[in-house]
């Protein structure tokens, strides 16, 4: 099982996104009718080393994008964008210079 960390929970106080790609603030779960059931940001530790390496972002109870550190070097190198819960764009930084060099539009 993959380790999950809801950004607004106290158990995730030490979970941090790489500095190069971190948002200016961590967003708490949305307020409003039904929105509190889905967090705005979920950090995932896919390799169980204690550090999140995948961040899932939600808007209006739907996934909007995923950012990942695929090679576990502390820098985001994969970006996946969604529209209506379907993948619309995937970008990858295969030479690890911080810029996407492979992409696919769907």
Image (spheres, grey):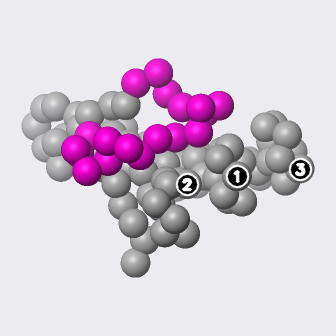
Q: How far apart are marks 2 and 3 (CA)?
A: 18 Å
Q: Is residue 61 visible?
A: no
| Residue 84 percent across, percent down from the top left | 45, 48
Q: In the displayed image of the protein, which residue is found farthest to the top?
A: 24
What x and y, as percent, mark residue 44?
Answer: 44, 58
Q: Mark 3 points at which residue?
A: 95
Task: Looking at this view, name the residue that lies furthest to the bottom.
Answer: 1
Q: Name the residue under label 2.
A: 53
Note whether 4 is above or below 101 in the view shown: below
Q: For mark 1, what is the residue?
A: 73
Q: Where is residue 65 in the image (x, y as percent from the top left)?
A: 52, 45
| Dot in front, 1 or 2 | 1
Quadrant of the image containing the N terminus: bottom left
Q: Is mark 2 on a helix, strand or loop?
A: loop
- The local crowd at label 3, few if under 14, some if 14 to 19, many if 20 or more residues have their Cα within 10 Å, is few
Q: Is residue 52 magenta?
A: no
In the displayed structure, does residue 18 sit left or right of residue 56? right
Which residues lie in the magenta part?
Answer: 7-25
Q: Which of marks 2 and 3 is nearer the N terminus?
A: 2
- The reply to whether residue 36 is in sight is yes
**Which residue is at a point 54% across and 49% down the rendered structure image?**
66
* Along the line of sight, the residue nearer the viewer: 87 or 92: 92
Q: How far apart are marks 1 and 3 (CA)?
A: 12 Å
Question: SS of the residue at dot 3?
Answer: loop
Magenta span: chief secondary structure: loop
């Amino acid at each position: 099982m993959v380790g999950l960390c809801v950004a607004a929970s106290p158990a995730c106080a030490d979970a941090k996104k790489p500095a190069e790609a971190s948002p200016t603030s961590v967003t708490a779960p949305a307020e409003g009718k039904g929105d509190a059931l889905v967090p705005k940001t979920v950090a995932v530790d896919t390799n169980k080393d204690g550090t999140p390496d995948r961040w899932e972002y939600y808007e209006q109870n739907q996934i909007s994008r995923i950012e990942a550190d695929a090679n576990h070097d502390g820098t985001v190198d994969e970006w996946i964008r969604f529209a209506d819960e379907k993948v619309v764009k995937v970008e990858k930084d295969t030479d690890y210079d911080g810029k996407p060099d492979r992409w696919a539009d769907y």
